[in-house]
Image: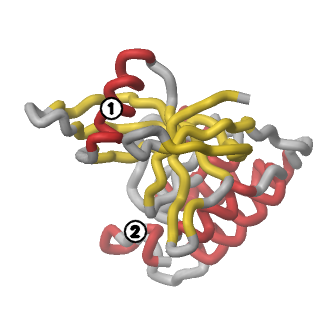
Amino acid sequence: MKNIPLFPLNIVALPKEKIPLHIFEPRYKRMIKNSINSGEPFGIVHQDQDGFKSIGCSVKIVNVIKEYPSGEFDIIVEGQQCFQIETKVQEDDNLWIGTVSFLKDQHQINEDLLDKIRDQYLHIIMKLGINEDMERHINKKNSFDFIEFVNLPNKIKQELLEEDDENKRLQIINRIFTAVMSISNFGLNGQQISEA
């Protein structure tokens, strides 16, 4: 288990996903400054009207785009690992600190399903006109790799985050890709996957 700062937001971060953030609240400016200085991750957890979820994703800062004189930041973070919050406490400035355990997948990957998803993914990105760095796309090996260009609703992203069976995550992605590919005009006029 590890203690990490928690950043409740109305978004869901997934492993390998890159997310731009503008940091302006004092407690989060402190958190980001500490993360930059230490190289340590912090956790993004989805917050809705019922509070925040118990499963989130650790992120690391991969790019500090701008640091403002006010101490605000524009940054890019990248999702690292799914975690379960075991306990949480608030510091004096209301920054949440969570004691978290990192989650591990519990099942062997179904290689046939993985190959099917990879074929669907390659078909979709080629229809979108993405043809650079094809070797990187061909070598993707897990569910989180394949949703790089997919703008999913928070509910589905949280479902993927909470699922500890890689094959079940791949099945969810298979259903999404099958639906996208069934759209007769998919890929025309720069259509985005999020429209599916």
Colour basis: secondary structure
Above or below 52: residue 194? below
Within-10-Å neighbours for mark 2: few <14, some 14–19, many 20+: some
Q: Residue 15: image x %, image y %? A: 59, 42
- Pick the front one: 14 or 68: 68
Looking at the image, residue 2 sits to the left or right of residue 165; the answer is: left
Residue 104 visible in the picture: yes
Q: Farthest residue to the top: give it.
A: 38
Residue sitting nearer the eye, 161 or 131: 161
Helix, strand or loop under label 1: helix
Q: Position of residue 107 (x, y in %)?
A: 91, 44
Q: Is residue 171 above or below residue 106?
A: below
View extreme (left): residue: 69
**What residue lies at 50% left-to-right and 78% top-to-bottom?**
196
Which residue lies at the image location 40% right of the left edge and 30% below the top edge?
A: 61
Amino acid type of the residue that numbered disc 2 sits on in the rendered structure = Gln
Report the number of discs: 2
Residue 78 in the image, given as x and y percentages of width and height: 47, 37
In the rendered image, which quarter is residue 106 located in? top right
Residue 38 vertical placement versus 13 (above, below): above
Toward the front, the furthest residue is: 92
Q: Amino acid at mark 1?
A: Arg
User: Marks 1 and 2, how far apart in space?
Assistant: 37 Å
Mark 1 neighbour class, 10 Å CA radius: few under 14, some 14 to 19, many 20 or more: some
Badge 1 or badge 2: first in the primary sequence: 1
Per the image, the residue denoted by label 2 is 192
Q: Quadrant of residue 33?
A: top left
Residue where numbered disc 1 is placed: 30
